[in-house]
Amino acid sequence: MSTLQLSLAIIGGLVLALIVAYNTWTSRRNAPKRALPQEPVDPAGEPTQRQEPGFDAGAAVAVPPGEFHGLDRGPDPSEHAVDADEALQLPVPPFSLERRPGLDPLIDVIASLQPEHVVSGDAALAALPPTRRAGSKPFAIEGLNEANQQWETPAPGQRYQSFQAGVQLANRMGALNEIEFSEFVVKAQAFADAINAAPDFPDMLQEVARARELDQFASDHDAQLMFMLRARQAAWSPGYVQQNAARLGFVPGAMPGRLVLPASAQGLPPLLTLGYDTQAALAEDPDQSAIRDITLSLDVAQVHRTEQPFARLRDVGAALCEAMDGVLCDQNGQPLPAMAMDPIAADLELLYDQLDGRDLSAGSVLARRLFS
């Protein structure tokens, strides 16, 4: 082999090696980012220290009681006392001041049902219709408890001296129409016949008109914000998204590819929802699934304004963009400058005031029913 052939062979080998190295680097650079392994955590919330197995079982050093190696253990619990007068002056959460759950004339058509005699809860339950909807609207029957004089859903073992049937005037499916009102009348009449009660129904045309007016108000004040976080370079794996979201308080939702940020009070709708491709979440090997964008959404009417949900959304979006090397965009994928968020915040405050003025404050029981 001549010197020229040898040189060409060496050059070809180097070029081939460079191509392989470049392809390897590119594939690793563009591979979905994976979740980092985490240290095991003990029940107290502190990372568990790894210990190598040893042969001397007595090697562990016990800390004598009362010695904390210079650490301040804080005041003794017995020194804390709560004054009863001060406790009564503590602020009450806004959720305790809202209307009671159940039928409300503000958003429901209500028909009174007066039986001839007191009706047991078991008899009322047996007479309830099999479905709790009239068309696309929720339908309910409540009884006036003879013992506590409170309206409630019929329960076994109780006695009721009066009943009322109701159907919701509007929801996100639209306003109550004549057909749905007629179905409501049929269901309520059947229940009244079963318990031997005399029904008193409101005027259909008047209630349908009221439903249209409420639906128009709801349509004009229904805000559901959605923003997109798009990867700048490397895509994300589902585990990577979950790990970064969990650091901000998100927990898995009821559906694959959905994470939620819980509200401060248990039983309330989530503050924020984070979503990504369902197929990626259900893949056999999620680490190989590539996610290029995720969505952050806020259902304004479902969350009380005292939770500051939009401010939380901005903070969460900025934190995720920084941690995951992403950019915040609108729902169409157009990057959003930081200054574009301030007008949205101002519009939301105006929306909150308008909902408050209609007794449909965001996050209240009635607002959650109406905007559902």
Image (cartoon, rainbow, N blue to C red):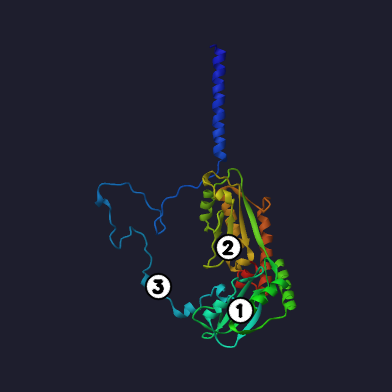
The quarter holding residue 306 reads bottom right
Looking at the rendered structure, the kind of residue marked 1 is Phe
Mark 3 highlights which residue? 80
**Badges 2 and 1: C-beta atoms under 8 Å apart?**
no
Say whether residue 133 is left or right of residue 284.
right
Residue 108 in sight = no
Q: Secondary structure at mark 1?
A: helix
Mark 2 highlights which residue? 271
The quarter holding residue 261 reads bottom right
Q: CA distance from mark 3 to mark 1?
A: 57 Å
Q: Is 355 located above or below residue 332 in the figure? A: below
Residue 240 lies, in percent from the top left, at 53, 49
Looking at the rendered structure, the kind of residue marked 2 is Leu
- The residue mark sitting in front, 2 or 3, is 2
Q: Is 258 located above or below residue 119 in the figure? A: above
Q: Secondary structure at mark 3?
A: loop
Residue 83 lies, in percent from the top left, at 44, 78
Q: CA distance from mark 2 to mark 3?
A: 34 Å
Q: Residue furthest bottom?
A: 116
